[in-house]
Structure formats: C-alpha cells, structure tokens
Image (spheres, grey):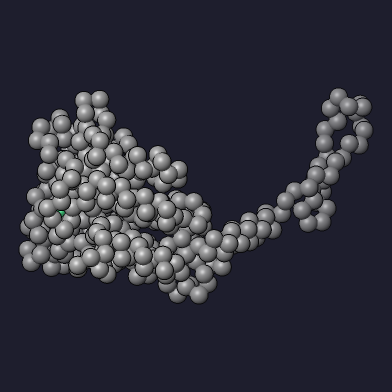
C-alpha cells in the first residue's frame, strides 16, 4: 500500500476474476483525512450553533406545580384550564420539557433552537395522576393534560418529574401505590424524592434530616426499584448544612442526589454554568402575574425570558456539545470543558 499525498491511499487490489493474474489493477481511492474531517465537522457544528444563537450556558425555568383542581384553594393550585394554558404557552414559546434528572446530569437532548424547561409536580396528589382500571389517566389530571398537549404540539415532550411523598397519589395499598409508580416509569416520567412525611428539614439535627430523606428514598425504591436522581426540599427549606440533603446514609438506605431543588423563585442556571449549584436549585411557582406573583412566578418569568432571549437556554440540537457565544466562556464549568463548543 502506497500513500499518495494527503488523503489519497493507493490500494493494490487483488485481481480477482477480471483479466487474469499479473494484471496491474491498482486503483486510487480517496480517503478522508481524519484530522481535516474532524475540523470540518466542528466548523459545521459551530456554524449551526451560531445560526440558532445556541446558549447552553443560559437560564432554564424549572416550574413547580402542585395540584390541578377545578376549585383552587391555595396559591399553589392551578385549574385544568390554567394548567393547559401554561403548557400551551411553553410550547408556543419554543420550550421542550426535560426531566429534573436529565437537567441536573446535563443530558439535555432537545432540537436546535429550542429552550429547555423542567416541569415538576410536588406532593403526589390524585389531581396529578389518577388511573382507571385499564391504566388510562383520568380526564383533567395533570398527566392527561400534559400528554394531550404533547400530542397536539409535535416536539413538545410529555416529560416531567414527580416529587412523591407518602401520600402517593392518594393510594394506601402497596399494590396500588406500585401501580402508580410503575405507570409513571413505563410512560417515561421521572420520580424524585420529596421525603416520605414532608416535614421541614430546617434546623433539624443531621440524623433527623438524613432519616427523613432516606425514608423518601426507601418509599420510591421499594415500589419502583430506581433510586431518585433528585430531591425537592419540603417547603423549599434547606437543612442546616446544605450537603446533608445531597448525600447521606441511614441504616441500610443511602442516597446521593445529583441535584436538590428549592421552592423559589428565579429561573435556574444551565447545568453547564458555573452558577449551577446542585445543593440549591431554584424553581418558579406556576402562577399568573398578580399579587406576590407580579414578578417572581411563571407568567412573569416567561415574559422576562422572552424579552431577554440572550439570557435563556437555547439548544444547538447536539446533546454531546455545550454550545455558547465565546463571550460567555468564563462561565463554563470545568467538568464540561471537553464538550465545549464556543462560537
Ligand atoms: Zn411539597
């Protein structure tokens, strides 16, 4: 085999069945130079990222839902119509849901030009998930509405994280609780730890904090098998040492969360951004722009992100790269340097 110049390899081909032995049938076959190809592919990725103004160091709204009920009784409730409108707005504004587990571990796989949003549901109320005997979600439940909006808006994934507690969607029999967990798992939903008994962890000694969180972990794993990737703190209250919420061990149960979520009240940094703090990830309450939600709940923040599009997370469509305008380079977390795609 002789190499002719860059990228050309001459192969002495076997003269098989085409003119007899000894015939010189040497053919020149172009071979793409690996280094040049890599450079070319990277240039194409950079151009594609610039074209959609990718900003994978930008901000991501993590929206916190509680109950979806006809007659709201608390500031946290949404009606089915409001919830549907919340989701339709997200779809219209170019958001694609990712789970809390995907977000905190940096596995954000959404199309180019789209924005990531994380939908979280706290406290496992029956208004979020109630199933009939065939395993079909009841009309008007959060899951049914989410699946319906996803069906009507191609590309809008029915992805969400359910922060369950001992309430377990109103089910008390272990078999029925297991049905709920299995259904969520089989339909691609993420299940997070919200502790079993939903006590505030604020000011408690380490042993008590770890026991509460481990009980939540055990509740989920006993029914579902997979340990939760993330934790949402009850009432958003952090323990005296923030790290107690991330990892701990109580008896034969240990937990190690990739992220711990708070209750308020700003969009969250991208997981690739230095500002990302896995011990305290902010969420936004789902609520209209009124009263104490005039500035710091979902409608207000989604308006703000529309008006400040340069600050919002925008995907380049390639989950293996972290694309961003060069100017933002100092904010890239070192762990993701190998995936960096500045433009
Ligand atoms: Zn809660």
Q: Position of residue 225 (x, y in %)?
A: 24, 38
Whether residue 210 is visible to the viewer of this picture, yes or no, is no
- Front in this rendered view, residue 291 or 18: 291
Whether residue 23 is visible to the viewer of this picture, yes or no, is yes
For ligand 1, the image quadrant comes to: bottom left
Q: Position of residue 231 (x, y in %)?
A: 22, 54
Q: Tell me the residue at 12%/33% (across/down).
A: 174
- As drawn, is 195 to the left or to the right of 116? left
For the C terminus, give its image quadrant: bottom right
**Image position of 16 with respect to 147: above or below:** above
Q: Position of residue 83 (x, y in %)?
A: 27, 49
Q: Tell me the residue at 31%/53% (across/down).
A: 86
- As drawn, is 214 to the left or to the right of 143? left
- Residue 219 occupies which quadrant of the picture? top left
- Front in this rendered view, residue 341 or 180: 180
- Residue 204 occupies which quadrant of the picture? bottom left
For the N terminus, give its image quadrant: top right
Q: Position of residue 135 (x, y in %)?
A: 25, 29
Q: Tell me the residue at 59%/59% (across/down).
A: 48
- Residue 172 occupies which quadrant of the picture? top left
Q: Tell me the residue at 24%/59% (across/down).
A: 287
């Amino acid at each position: 085999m002789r190499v002719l110049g860059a990228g050309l390899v001459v192969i002495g081909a076997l003269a098989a069945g085409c003119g007899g032995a000894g015939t010189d049938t040497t053919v020149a076959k172009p071979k793409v130079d690996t280094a040049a190809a890599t450079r070319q592919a990277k240039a194409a990725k950079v151009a594609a990222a610039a074209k959609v103004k990718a900003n994978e160091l930008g901000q991501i709204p993590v929206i916190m839902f509680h109950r979806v009920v006809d007659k709201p009784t608390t500031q946290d409730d949404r009606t089915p119509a409001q919830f549907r409108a919340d989701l339709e707005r997200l779809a219209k504004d170019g958001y694609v849901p990712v789970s809390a587990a995907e977000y905190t571990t940096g596995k954000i796989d959404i199309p180019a030009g789209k924005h990531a949003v994380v939908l979280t549901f706290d406290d496992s109320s029956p208004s979020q998930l109630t199933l009939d005997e065939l395993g079909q979600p009841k009309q008007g439940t959060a899951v049914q509405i989410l699946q319906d909006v996803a069906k009507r808006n191609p590309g809008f994934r029915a992805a969400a994280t359910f922060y369950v507690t001992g309430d377990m969607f109103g089910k008390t029999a272990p078999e029925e609780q297991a049905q709920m967990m299995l259904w969520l798992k089989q339909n691609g939903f993420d299940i997070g730890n919200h502790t079993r008994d939903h006590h505030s962890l604020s000011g408690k000694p380490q042993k008590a904090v770890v026991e509460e969180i481990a009980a939540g972990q055990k509740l989920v794993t006993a029914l579902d098998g997979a340990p939760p990737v993330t934790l949402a703190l009850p009432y958003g209250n952090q323990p005296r040492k923030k790290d107690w919420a991330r990892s701990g061990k109580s008896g034969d149960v240990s937990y190690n969360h990739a992220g711990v979520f708070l209750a308020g009240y700003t969009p969250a940094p991208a997981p690739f951004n230095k500002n990302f703090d896995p011990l305290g990830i902010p969420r936004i309450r789902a609520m209209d722009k009124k009263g104490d939600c005039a500035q710091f709940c979902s409608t207000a923040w989604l308006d703000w992100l529309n008006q400040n599009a340069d600050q919002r997370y925008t995907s380049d469509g390639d989950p293996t790269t972290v694309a961003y305008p060069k100017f933002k380079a100092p904010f890239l977390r070192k762990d993701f340097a190998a995936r960096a795609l500045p433009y």
